[in-house]
Amino acid sequence: MQEQDSNEINSAELNVSDSAKKCVKSGTKEFIDWAITLGVAILLAFLIRHFLFAIFIVDGESMYPTLKDSEWLVVNKAIYLMDEPKPGQIVVFHATETRDYIKRVIAVEGDEIEIINGVVIINGEPIAEQYINEPMEFYNNYPKTIIPENKIFVMGDNRNRSADSRMPDIGLIDLSKVVGRADLVFWPIAEMTKLN
């Protein structure tokens, strides 16, 4: 009888031991599955952030009324891998080593630009600029210039409060400095707007 009780106890211990081993294996497998999922998510976030899209926060009034200070934007970084900026698009570019600017493309490679008393003339024709905040009072003249290869001419919509291509210290923007095209204002939510 004692031997039978001992066998039953050993059998019960084996069953508990097997169940514990299965539980540990199951927990380990679940942990590995979660770790792989988390790793893939982090990798995708990194790839999306560095190669496809970026978040940009508007700092200042240079693009008012189109964009307001502190608005959050989605910037499409991949678009210019297949295409080049076009007049009217809003782009983010590296203005200095540590600072990015956001401006509107006014002229591209091959265009002839001239500004006379605040009137922007592209290829001999004044352009309609319904997006500007007010007439230009400062830097409202710019000599006739043909935009060279791989360069763009940009200006802020709030011309009197914008540091842009009219200023000699900024000048024409090299395409290699363009980060991407601003596509969407997403914050604050009440101001959510598709751009371009």
Image: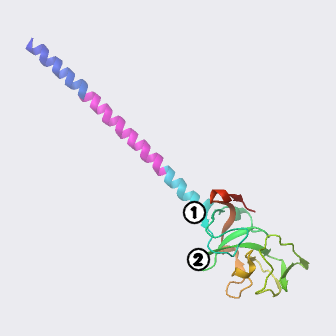
Front residue (pair 111, 159): 159
Q: Give coordinates of residue 55: x percent, y percent.
A: 60, 63
- Secondary structure of the residue carrying tag 2 is loop
Q: Residues within 10 Å of mark 1 (few under 14, many from 20)?
A: few
Q: Give coordinates of residue 185: x percent, y percent.
A: 67, 61
Tell me where the magenta segment starts and ends, as one range: 17-39
Q: Compared to 186, does 175 lie above or below?
A: below
* Residue sitting at x 16%, y 21%: 9
> Which quadrant of the rendered structure holds the N terminus?
top left
Instruction: Judge whether residue 111 can be spotted in this image.
Output: yes
Question: In the figure, is residue 119 to the left or right of 35?
Answer: right
Three-letter code, disc 2: Arg
* Residue sitting at x 68%, y 84%: 170
> Which quadrant of the rendered structure holds the C terminus?
bottom right
Q: How is the image coloured?
A: rainbow
Q: Compared to 112, does 190 lie above or below?
A: above
> Which quarter of the figure has residue 79?
bottom right
Question: In the figure, is residue 19 to the left or right of 60?
Answer: left
| Residue pointed to by mark 1 | 50
Disc 2 vs disc 1: which is toward the camera? 2
Q: Give coordinates of residue 188: x percent, y percent.
A: 62, 60
| Residue pointed to by mark 2 | 99
What is the spatial separation of the Cα atoms under label 2 and label 1, in whole angstroms?
17 Å
Q: Give coordinates of residue 155: x percent, y percent.
A: 74, 77
148 magenta-colored: no
Question: In the figure, is residue 191 to the left or right of 13?
Answer: right
> Which quarter of the figure has residue 125?
bottom right
* Residue sitting at x 79%, y 77%: 134
Q: Compared to 43, does 92 lie above or below?
A: below
Residue occupying the far top of the picture: 1
